[in-house]
């Protein structure tokens, strides 16, 4: 995580058309987006869209201004990712020969990950952490055979009180 | 009351209740229920266009001229997609247009049904908002919301997509419409429409405390200040406030393409249009200024030229309704977010009288006279003067896009606010003729001129038929130089005179006029100019005038693309520049 990592967090109407419009807007404005994640919030009918950007603060702030104009957006803020907690979830299906199982489980343990399924074509490993942490774990797992990877994209919350978007609705 | 109404009837009734009186449209399969209902609502005048693009431009013209939303209607599929250019035009220039499109029945949606298209998806980037109406119960609220959103804050186009079966769906107990809670045409950035989902949107930002005093201090201290006026002044109707600001301070006023006519053309403080085709003294004034008061403009690249070299010594006080415009292109020392008129009303009490005589004198010294010769004396200035004279200066000019647009912008003597209408941001050729129909309906009894080049005119000249059928008395002027003139000019300046695909053949416009049964004229020299224009003006109904102008005339000065405002081309370039 570096100084140019910005998080844009958006609370918006939980409808496909609204989410579609918001994602379309960040594409159309040619913003340097690294990751987009969408999910529900504690408020029924309101979703949170988390956009991770590689940019300066002014660009992130501009993204907020454009998003705030959109019908269906309830609140939007930008903050340096350093000023918050950012996490993503990854599911990795990995295959290892029987004799390397112990070695694989060591890696899983090292990254505080867990084996959540023991399927016929490999183990499914679940891990959570910052983007860098997830990438590091994936590299460690590459010495085995990675069959498939699913990542959630990064979600984040700002730590400072004045950035609690939930209260802004 | 337990009256039962169809969705289509409800739609008509709500439009009428909201004050809509004219629809520009074209029927088709998926919008037939609406057209079936229309004859029951004679308060809604329907103008049958000859192409849906014209419906969108006409609605746009109506909106620009009236300040109220213009409404266009099209069927699903090709009808809806034909609206796209018109909606994009309205979006770029922030004008309130509501488009109502038919959609295939709900049960057919998503199955590639006949004439099905995802018009909401297609228009998402070029509308302020759009909505698929999924049930008849939503119709009344959706129509009110659409009109509200189109007109509130920074205006823009809104699209309502109405499936055919929803138009046919019956709502029992529809009863009388709920009375409209707000007068149409009023723009209020802070109120919430009745029952609207807009209730949950983010509040508009305001000006921080002390910013008016700060702005006033900058205005008092500036040695070389300028006021730059954009479309926001027209949209907010801040003409009187602008004039007070200028006259109290003596600060010269620059009007951008869409700001033209917001300030009297002949006012001693008026400098003219800036940017790519701005006069040398206007652009030089910008480059020398130490303070720019930007009112309702977005500093488009055609205004600023190369941003790195734009007004480097100037601080900017940027007044804009849309916060995201402040600092987007040009950094602002002070951003005042709000309707231009509201902001000026709060700012003016802080402004003490001053003068800018030395600065104005300096700018006067920047003025260059150009010697331009036009074939048979038929100069753009002479033509525009004749038009102005024929209308006693009281007409509305709707221009198209290209060389004539720049002449019309710079040379016509506008006397009334909002009497110049053009497609600025999108630069849509073919805009003038259909948009002028909307202007004429919004300003009945007033002369309306659509001025086009021979290229743009041929893009939408089918609308003459609409004017004839509907009795819309637009006077159409075609500046015929046998070229797509602006592109040809670029080819001459920057592409080694390779006139690729720019010579353009025209039909005999006098015969064309005759075919449509309207008055047609060809003007080839200065001698016949005044009388012919006067005849055309006096003739009832639409008229078509073809002006045979110099074939290879250029618009001067010109800032080359990518150049700064300090590098104008002021005459025929001696060296042929070849593109990099």
Image (cartoon, rainbow, N blue to C red):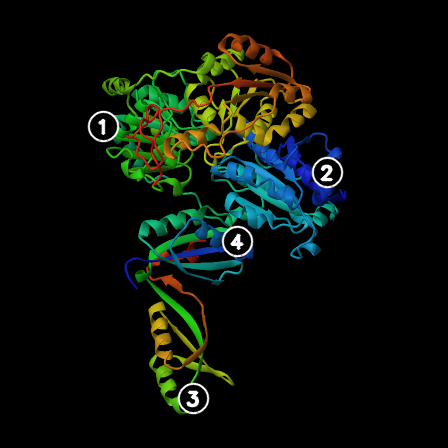
What residue is shown at x 32% (from left), y 49% (from top)?
A58
Identify the residue shown where x is 37% and y is 24%: B556
Instruction: Place residue B350 in its image quadrant.
Output: top left
| Front residue of this view, candidates B468 and B484 | B484
Residue linked to disc 3: A97
Callout 2: SS: helix
Where residue B57 appears, x then y in whole percent?
A: 57, 33
Q: Is residue B485 above or below residue B327?
A: above
> For the residue carrying disc 3, how many other residues have a C-alpha within 10 Å: few (<14), some (14-19), or many (20+)?
few
Q: Which residue is mark 1?
A: B221
Which residue was labeled with disc 4?
A: A18
Mark 1 touches mark 3? (CB < 8 Å): no
Please say if the residues under marks 2 and 4 sit with CB atoms less than 8 Å apart. no
Q: Report the Cα–Cα distance between label 3 and label 4.
A: 47 Å
Label 4 secondary element: helix
- Badge nearest the viewer, 2 or 3: 3
């Amino acid at each position: 995580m570096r100084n140019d990592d910005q998080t844009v967090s958006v609370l918006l109407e939980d409808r496909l058309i609204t989410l579609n419009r918001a994602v379309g807007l960040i594409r159309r404005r040619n913003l340097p987006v690294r990751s987009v994640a969408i999910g529900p919030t504690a408020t029924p009918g309101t979703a949170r869209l988390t956009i991770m950007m590689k940019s300066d603060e002014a660009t992130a702030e501009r993204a907020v201004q454009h998003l705030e104009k959109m019908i269906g957006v309830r609140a939007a803020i930008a903050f340096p990712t350093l000023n918050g907690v950012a996490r993503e979830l990854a599911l990795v299906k990995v295959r290892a020969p029987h004799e390397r199982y112990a070695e694989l489980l060591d890696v899983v343990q090292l990254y505080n990950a867990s084996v959540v399924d023991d399927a016929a074509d490999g183990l499914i490993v679940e891990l959570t952490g910052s983007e860098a942490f997830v990438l590091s774990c994936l590299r460690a797992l590459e010495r085995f055979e990675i069959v498939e990877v699913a990542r959630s994209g990064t979600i984040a919350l700002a730590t400072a009180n004045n950035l609690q978007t939930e209260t802004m609705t | 009351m337990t009256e039962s109404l169809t969705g289509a009837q409800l739609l008509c009734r709500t439009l009428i209740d909201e004050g809509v009186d004219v629809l520009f449209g074209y029927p088709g399969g998926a919008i037939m229920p609406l057209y079936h209902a229309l004859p029951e609502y004679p308060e809604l005048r329907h103008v049958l266009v000859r192409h849906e693009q014209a419906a969108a431009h006409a609605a746009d013209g109506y909106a620009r001229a009236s300040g109220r939303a213009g409404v266009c209607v099209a069927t699903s599929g090709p009808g809806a997609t034909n609206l796209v250019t018109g909606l994009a035009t309205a979006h770029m220039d922030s004008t309130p247009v509501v488009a109502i499109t038919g959609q295939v029945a709900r049960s057919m949606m998503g199955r590639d049904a006949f004439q099905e298209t995802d018009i909401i998806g297609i228009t998402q980037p070029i509308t302020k908002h759009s909505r698929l109406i999924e049930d008849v119960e939503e119709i009344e609220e959706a129509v009110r919301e659409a009109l509200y959103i189109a007109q509130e804050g920074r205006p823009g186009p809104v699209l309502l997509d109405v499936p055919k079966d929803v138009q046919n769906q019956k709502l029992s107990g529809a009863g009388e419409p709920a009375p409209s809670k707000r007068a149409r045409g009023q723009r209020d950035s802070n109120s919430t429409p009745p029952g609207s989902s807009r209730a949950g949107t983010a509040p508009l930002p305001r000006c921080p405390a002390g910013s008016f005093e700060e702005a006033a201090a900058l205005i008092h201290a500036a040695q070389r200040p300028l006021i730059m006026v954009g479309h926001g002044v027209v949209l907010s109707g801040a003409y009187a406030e602008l004039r007070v600001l200028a006259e109290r301070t003596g600060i010269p006023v620059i009007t951008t393409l869409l700001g033209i006519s917001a300030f009297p053309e002949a006012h001693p403080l008026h400098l003219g249009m800036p940017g790519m085709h701005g006069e040398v003294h206007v652009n030089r004034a910008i480059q020398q200024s130490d303070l720019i008061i930007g009112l309702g403009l977005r500093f488009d690249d055609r205004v600023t030229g190369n941003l790195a070299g734009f007004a480097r010594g100037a601080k900017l006080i940027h007044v804009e309704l849309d916060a995201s415009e402040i600092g987007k292109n040009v950094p602002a020392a002070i951003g005042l977010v709000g309707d231009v008129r509201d902001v000026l009303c709060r700012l003016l009490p802080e402004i003490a009288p001053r003068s800018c005589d030395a600065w104005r004198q300096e700018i006067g010294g920047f003025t260059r006279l150009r010697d331009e010769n036009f074939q048979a004396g038929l100069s753009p200035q002479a033509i525009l003067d004749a038009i102005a004279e024929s209308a006693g200066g009281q007409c509305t000019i709707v221009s198209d896009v290209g060389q004539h647009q720049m002449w019309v912008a710079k040379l016509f003597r506008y006397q009334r606010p909002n009497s110049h209408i053009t497609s600025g941001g999108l630069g849509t050729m073919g805009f003038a003729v259909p948009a002028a129909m909307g202007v004429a309906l919004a300003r009945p009894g007033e002369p309306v001129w659509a001025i086009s080049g021979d290229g743009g005119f041929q893009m939408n000249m089918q609308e003459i038929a609409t004017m004839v059928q509907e009795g819309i008395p637009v006077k159409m002027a075609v500046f015929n130089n046998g070229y797509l003139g602006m592109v040809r000019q670029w080819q001459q300046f920057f592409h080694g005179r390779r006139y690729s695909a720019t010579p353009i053949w025209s039909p005999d416009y006098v015969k064309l006029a005759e075919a449509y049964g309207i008055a047609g004229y060809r003007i080839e020299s200065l001698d016949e100019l005044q009388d012919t224009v006067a005849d055309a003006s006096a003739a009832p109904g639409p008229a078509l005038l073809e002006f045979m102008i110099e074939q290879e005339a250029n618009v001067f000065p010109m800032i080359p693309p990518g150049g700064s405002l300090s590098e104008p081309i002021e005459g025929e370039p001696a060296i042929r520049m070849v593109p990099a």
